[in-house]
Amino acid sequence: MAAPGNRRSAIVTATVMIVGSLAWITGISFSGLEGSRGFFGTGPLIADANLILEVILVAGITYGFLLARRGNIDAHQINQTTWVILNLGLIVLVMAGSMQDVKIAKTADLADWRIGVTWLHAAVGTFTALTGLWIVLQMNDLLPRGLHVAAWKNLMRAAFAGYWLTALLGFATYYLWYIA
């Protein structure tokens, strides 16, 4: 267990990072700049900002995996909780709304690479986000004992793989919509 001062500092840092990132995204939306030219010159600003934060998120999730492998479970808990919360915020503020641009009228619409990959990204991402939330609720003792998953190390590994797969599908989605 980390010293109380170190734990408090880590929690404050995590809170500032989450609030700052989500404030950045919200500021882009509220200012009406989400559709303006992004940093990379091919996509809109909101997509580029989200892409940057998702790269940082996957790096953070990976770092948390390494913390657990090294046995630093307290730091792992704070780290993973941070990234899961940020991911949920990005889903609500950016990704959920963007799905309105990818409506499916008929099953054949999924044959279009842009639509099919986007929906696959959304499906895998949703499952991964819910799995990550379940794990965070369990590891922070916020989930009733009767709902705890016994083999949760396997669930953590699956979520870790899910975050990576979601990120790769996110890159593919960005590529298909803004570069190809």
Image (tube, rainbow, N blue to C red):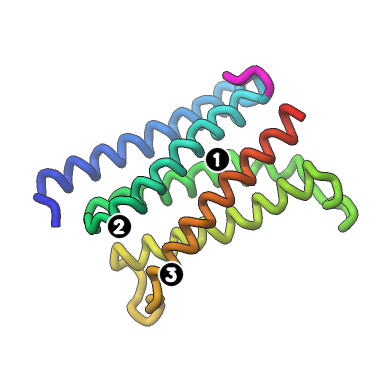
Q: Amino acid at mark 3?
A: Asn
Q: Earlier in the sequence, mark 2 or mark 3?
A: 2
In the rendered view, tell whether residue 5 sits above or below residue 53: below
Q: Secondary structure at mark 1?
A: helix
Q: Nearer the viewer, residue 35 or 56?
A: 56
Q: Residue at x 38, y 78 (%)?
A: 150
The nearer-to-camera label among 2 and 1 is 2
Pointer 1 local density, CA inside 10 Å: few below 14, some 14–19, many at least 20: some
Q: Secondary structure at mark 3?
A: helix
Q: In the image, residue 168 lies at what x, y percent?
A: 60, 44
Q: Amino acid at mark 2?
A: Arg
Is residue 52 rendered magenta in the image? Answer: no
Q: Residue at x 62, y 38 (%)?
A: 171
The nearer-to-camera label among 2 and 3 is 2
Pointer 2 local density, CA inside 10 Å: few below 14, some 14–19, many at least 20: few
Pointer 3 local density, CA inside 10 Å: few below 14, some 14–19, many at least 20: few
Q: In the image, residue 111 lies at what x, y percent?
A: 86, 50
Q: Residue at x 51, y 56 (%)?
A: 161
Magenta region = 38-42
Say which quadrant the N terminus sits in: bottom left
Q: Nearer the viewer, residue 147 or 58?
A: 58
Q: CA distance from mark 2 to mark 3?
A: 13 Å
Q: Residue at x 43, y 69 (%)?
A: 154
Q: CA distance from mark 3 to mark 1?
A: 30 Å
Q: CA distance from mark 2 to mark 1?
A: 32 Å
The residue under label 3 is 154
The label shown at residue 69 is 2
